[in-house]
Image (spheres, helix red, strand yellow):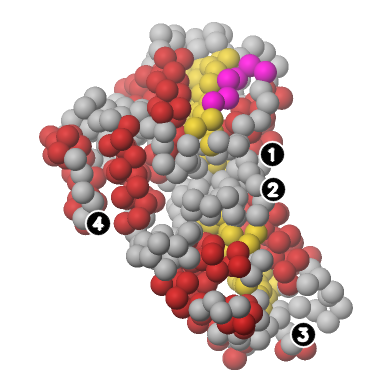
Amino acid sequence: MNQDTTMHPRDLLRQMFLAAVEAAQPARGVPPYLPPAPKGRLVVVGAGKASAAMAQAVEKNWPGPLEGLVVTRYGYAVPCAHVEIVEAAHPLPDAAGLAAAERILERVSGLTADDTVLCLISGGGSALLPLPLPGVTLGDKQAVNRALLKSGATISEINCVRRHLSAIKGGRLAAACYPAKVLTLLISDVPGDNPCDIASGPTVADPTTCADALAIVRRYEIELPQSLREILESGRGESIKPEDPRLAACTTRIIATPRMALEAAAEVAAKAGVTPYILGDAIEGEARDVGKVMAGIALHVVQHGQPFATPCVLLSGGETSVTVRGNGRGGRNVEFLLSLGVVLDGAPRIHAMAGDTDGVDGLEEVAGALLAPDTLARAWAKGIKPMDALQNNDGHGFFGALNDAVITGPTLTNVNDFRAIVILDPARD
């Protein structure tokens, strides 16, 4: 950090995170992509943690009549005059989400070629649209989701399985809209920004197959009820494929991405006199392993001035995973941060933050946490053993006990993980 810079690294980290979240707000991303007024009806549907805020942005910028229904996470509703907002559970689905999914399909049935469906999709939509295929119960879906989330599978793998057990995902919602035009606006929360992985792609074609889903189940040794296994083995759960004519009038636009969020954070750092380096917006893998790798890079910068000169900040995004072995409170961002801290072992000049841009890391109403050179020392002074916390998957418990948790409340958007490692000049020691 420049010698005349007085901003504390913790303040800089928080400002970068807030800038990342602000860059992905629906109020900024939705208006430029609104469709022309149709001859018939405009029906707004959607799902995800940002869907209610997206619907509000539509209403504020749409000059004509509209109607619709979107489902969002409990606590993420915002006022809308014409689009009904339903709240449901995430990450484990509930009956409210199931009922909302059924009603969304009813809303888009019987439309004509003069009508347009505006579909608003963001991260969290998979759990919020838990409409199972015939022969699958909500309890089955909940059990499979729980097992997948604990397995260490990537989000792409998890959503592949979800698509092939769903009556609304994997392009099925778009097929139900036919012959109406469908415009889908997406806020991406997945590495690579693949539309079929965002909320399991309810309005986009799915090139994956039941055989692919079954291979994932076997790879991670997921126990499936026989009824679900039969759906995959028989091919009865096959999703809508790219050549399906019902998707011919469907258009998809991604309006906010992890890359955009990281670039906004980079601008904040540059203005503070800290050179930003974006290492990637699609980093996956076990959270603790990614933490070890990032710690190695940061230590090399401190010790050798390579590959970057200080002061600098290393920014990255994506979606790591956690194979749950302990009984701690999670989640993946704080697990990354705790692993990073264990390897750094109090190394001077290195400060970091990791958090989920939706404000919820894992199952906790906590976005993430902050790490400083004295974090481990403060933990030891309280009798907290960092490695034990890591082995127990208890990042939230660890950082919460140190008052280093970052709590934002609902951010009304979701572009996945945010990680920032600030490395100061020696003069700032």
Q: Which circle's residue, 1 or 3, is located before the other in the chain? A: 1
State the image coordinates of residue 37 (x, y, percent, origin top left). Answer: 61, 16
Q: Name the residue: 79% across, 68% down.
A: 272
Circle 2 residue: 22
Circle 1 residue: 28
Q: Residues within 10 Å of mark 3 (few under 14, many from 20)?
A: few
Label 4 SS: loop
User: Magenta segment range?
Assistant: 81-86
Q: Main secondary structure of the magenta part?
A: strand
State the image coordinates of residue 80 (x, y, percent, origin top left). Answer: 66, 23
Q: Amino acid at mark 4?
A: Tyr
Tag of residue 220: 4
Q: Which circle's residue, 4 or 2, is located before the other in the chain? A: 2
Along the line of sight, the residue nearer the viewer: 15 or 374? 374
The Cα atoms of the two marked residues, 1 and 3, are separated by 37 Å
Q: Which circle's residue, 2 or 1, is located before the other in the chain? A: 2
Tag of residue 428: 3
